[in-house]
Image (cartoon, rainbow, N blue to C red):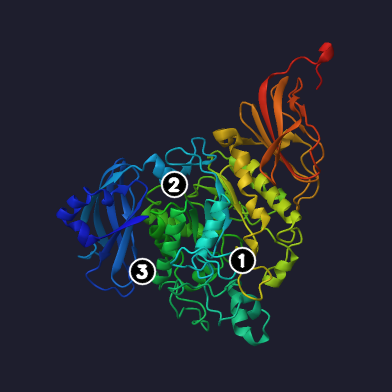
Amino acid sequence: MKKMWTAACLFSPLIVAAFAVPASAAVHVWEKQELTFQSARSFANAYADVTVWVDLTGPNFNKRVYGFWDGEQTFRVRVLPTEPGTWTWRSGSNPPDQGLAGKSGTFTAVAWSEEDKEKNPLRRGFLRPTANHHALEQADGTPFFVIGDTWYAVGTNRFKWYDDDQERPMGPTAGFKDYVRYRKAQGYNWVNVIAAFPNWMTDGAPWNVVMNDPDRTTIRSAWLEFGTGSAKNMDNEGGRPFFFPGKVPGYENMFPDMDKLNPKYFQFIDRKIDYLNDQGFVPFIEVSRRDASLIWKKYYQWPDSYSRFIQYVWTRYQANNTVLSPIHLDIISQSVSPDDFNQAIQVVMDKYGPPPFGTLLSANANPSTLENWGDDSWVTLHQTGNMREHNNYWYLTEIFNQPHPKPALNGEPYYSGYVDARGLNGGRGYQFGAPGGTEKDDQFVRSSMYGNFLSGGLSGHVYGAEGIWGADIEPVAPIKMWDAFQWNSAAQMRHLRTFALSIGKRYQELVPIADLVSPNKNPELRAYEGWAYCARTPDRNIFLAYFEKGCPRSQIRGAKLNGSYRAEWFDPRKGTWLDAGTGTVRSSVIGVIMLPDFPESIDWGLRLTYTGPAPPPQGGRRGN
């Protein structure tokens, strides 16, 4: 929910005084407020030529908050109070303008009731690192465990918006609100969004049709040259993110002008971001995908032009409960490197500073934000992604063990349905996956969920599926988006939260050490079977482990010496617990626990909870 005020309204002391009295005018903490200004004059390119801001002061807060151009002579600054009390602001602009600069206003913020917070958990505040910097919580200290999905094209008509709230079944008529309702019922609280998913002109045909049509050689060669091979006519009611014609010689009507932004496109995204927040979802918003930057770098002023767009998207959504990203860097190439994007983000940081309300900064990265940008960078929430098999879960352990800890998760893991058939949908094919909706595919998704979590991804996990990430709806698509939404693997995501929070907030203390399980690996690096993962609390009182299908009977080491532990298997298919054997196992004089046999020859989770010293074994001897 947001309050929208025009500058003229807030300039009036009488209206400001009246505002604070009626209950209907209450402003709550962590509730977006919108300040609207009309410039006194027109600008040739207001997007590129004008900067607007307010200096905002409130309890424990005194910062400059930048705004954005929203078409014609309209500018907006979105703010929010982070604590109850009186908040004041004063506007400025560069170049100075009578309609933008020198305005001021005041508002009073009050706290949400506990009942209000129960209705929408996001009213507890923005996300932040826990005290140990390994997991996420909200501003009031409530744990936040990500259960997310990859809806990169959510800002486009692929996720159709209906003004009404009628529920429509999963299928061709399903809309954005139906997908939100569906995932909310499954326990999701996060979605990945790319603000400007490659939105190039195609000529009306799907990408995979163009790539196989000999009569479309011009558009096909352009896509191949600039790496924009997933354009899918992804506009919305406001058009596309940038205006045409562009500056690429010979392709002016195919690739837009990156210095001429179209605010109407983003106006129609706004309602979806607001709706997601209203439904308790945190959108992870990435400004663009790496293939757009090939054109950007070659034909526009880099890094300044790209930095401008980063700042535009961030200022537009800085007062929503989001996590923000400068780039979706799923593939590293010689043409555009992490260093190129680091130049752009540093321009933003040097000129404007980080987002004013503490919004976390992250990025989809290959193989990780740590590998791409280092331990002491602008990143405040680490991610791994796009290197999928179990050999790559280790990148989260590397992040966990850094000198400057930061929360982490896998933001683009194994995709459900990611198989050779993907080659029919414009992809490269993938021989290590399984057809979507099958038990084998569900199993691989579970490996990714639990393996990444126990490798150090204590912030949660993001689901991915063919059909969904690309918002596939064309008749020629082998997997339709609405079909992929209904695969059982997505429904099993909620059980990861059950597993993690079964030990309460202590899951935030877990230390990932896969070698606590022995044996824990077979030689198959690019696979999802035969490996095991483990994490324990520093006091060795709690162990959580996960065993992929094909693991042999194992032992756990590193336990308290001569201790008794309650042993419980976790069924990741149903989210239920059952005692392992007699329900109690003992550690040896060197802290080794021999585990009982698995209940069945499939994948299982395990919880070991210390119950006290073990009684001496019969005969007075202790084994090892």
Q: Are marks 1 and 2 in contact (CB under 8 Å)?
A: no
Count the numbered circles shown.
3
Relative to 39, does residue 80 appear above or below in the rendering? above
- Which of 466 and 68 lies nearest the eye of the viewer? 466
Q: Quadrant of residue 623?
A: top right
What's the mark number on residue 354? none
Outermost residue, top direction?
620
Residue on which disc 2 sits = 119
Work out how far the residue at label 3 is from the one at label 1, CA to CA, in angstroms: 34 Å
Residue on which disc 1 sits = 481
Work out how far the residue at label 1 is from the one at label 2, CA to CA, in angstroms: 29 Å
Q: Are marks 2 and 3 in contact (CB under 8 Å)?
A: no
In the picture, the quarter occupied by the N terminus is: bottom left
Give how far across and how far down residue 492 sits, in percent. Answer: 65, 50
Give how far across and how far down residue 594 sits, in percent. Answer: 79, 29
- Dot 1 amino acid type: Met
What's the mark number on residue 47? 3
